[in-house]
Amino acid sequence: MALTMIPPSDAPDFLAAHGWGDARIVPLAGDASFRRYFRVIGEGRQAVLMDAPPPHEDPRPFVAVAEWLLARGLTAPTILARDLDRGLLLIEDFGDVRLRETLDATPQAESDYYAGITDLLLHLHGQPAMDGLRVHSLEQWLGEVSLFTDWYCPAFDLKVDEAGFFAAWEEVLKPVDVDGLPRVTVLRDYHAENIMLLAGREGIARYGLLDFQDALVGHPAYDLASVLEDARRDVSPAVEAQMLERYIDKSGMGEAFRTAYWALAAQRNTRILGVFVRLWKRDGKAGYRQYQPRMWGLLERDLMQPGLAPVRAWFDANIPAEKRAAAWSD
C-alpha cells in the first residue's frame, strides 16, 4: 500500500467552499494507514488538510476525540472545516516542531519533556472516560498479541505453540484486567512523533496531540508504556523509571499500576512486532523493519520482570535468539 502524495481531486473544491480557494496544497506526510496529510498555505495563514478516504478511513472518530480533548483543556487540532462523506478535514496546523526531533537535538532535556507528557496523561486520566469508545481489555489484548503469531512467526518460518502462547498471555494479563484501577481514555498511539511543541503555550497545553482517532477506554498504564517504550526512539531506562515513579506518586495507584505497566508494555511491544511485519509483508512498507531491533530490546527487557515469567518462558522455548533482533540486523 504505497501512498502517493498527490492531493485528492476534490480537495480544491472543498477548500474553495470553505474560503481557502486561493491556497496552495503541498505534501506533508502519510502514515501507516490510508490517511494522508497536506499543508494548505494561503495569504498569511496555513492549515492542514487531512485526507481520510472512505471506505478505508472514517474521519468521524478523529473529530469526536479532538473536540472531546479540547473541551478538557488538552491541545488537539481545532477542526476548521469538514466534509465527512468525502473524508476531508481542514484542521489547525501545529507547525513543524515535533517532540521527536527536539529530543534528538536536546537530549539533556529528555527528563523535563517526559515529565510534561507524563503530567498530560495524569490530567487526561483524571477525566471521566469519553463515552462511546470501544473497550480495551483482556479480550482485545489477547487478540492484539495474535498479530505476533499471525505475522511475525510465519515470516521466519517459526512453528510455535500457539495454545501455550495465549495461555501464557492470559495468565499475565487477566490479573491486570481485574485490578480495580479506573479505566480511562486511552489515546493508543501516544509517542514522541505524535506530539508537537507549540510556542506561546505553557504547561500541558504546549503539547499538541495528533493521531488519536483510534482512542479507546482502557487501562491507564497503556499510554504511559506507549510513550516511554517508544518504537521510534530510545528513551533512557533512567527516564522511564523516573516517569513510572512520577505517575505512581502523583496518581496514588501503587503497585497494581506498576504490575500493569510492565504487562501492557510487553503486550504492546509484542503486538507491534507483528504489526510492523504486516506493514512490510502486506502493505509494502519495508521502512518499518528498521524499528524491529529496538522492539526486541524493549520486549526482552519487559520480560525480565517477575510478573512476565510465563510469557518469558514461552518466548525462550519458541523463539530462538537468531529469530529476534539478530534477524533484522542486515
Image (cartoon, rainbow, N blue to C red):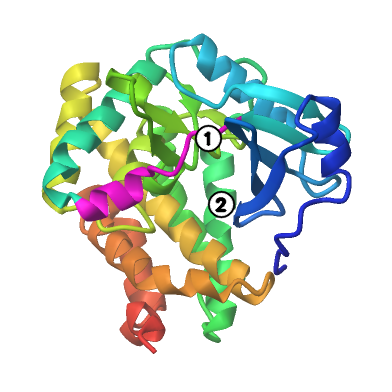
- Front-most of residues 280 and 204: 204
Mark 2 or mark 1: name the one nearer the start of the chain: 1
The CA distance from mark 2 to mark 1 is 11 Å
Give the residue furthest to the bottom.
Answer: 330
The picture places residue 13, in percent across and down from the top left corner, at 88, 37
Q: Which residue is mark 1?
A: 137
Q: Which residue is mark 2?
A: 144
Indicate the quadrant containing the N terminus: top left, top right, bottom left or bottom right.
Answer: bottom right
Whether residue 293 is situated above or below residue 72 in the rendered picture: below
The picture places residue 59, in percent across and down from the top left corner, at 73, 34
Q: Is residue 263 visible?
A: no
- Front-most of residues 313 and 253: 253
Secondary element at tag 1:
loop
Q: Is residue 111 magenta?
A: no
Q: Residues within 10 Å of mark 1 (few under 14, many from 20)?
A: some
The picture places residue 113, in percent across and down from the top left corner, at 23, 36
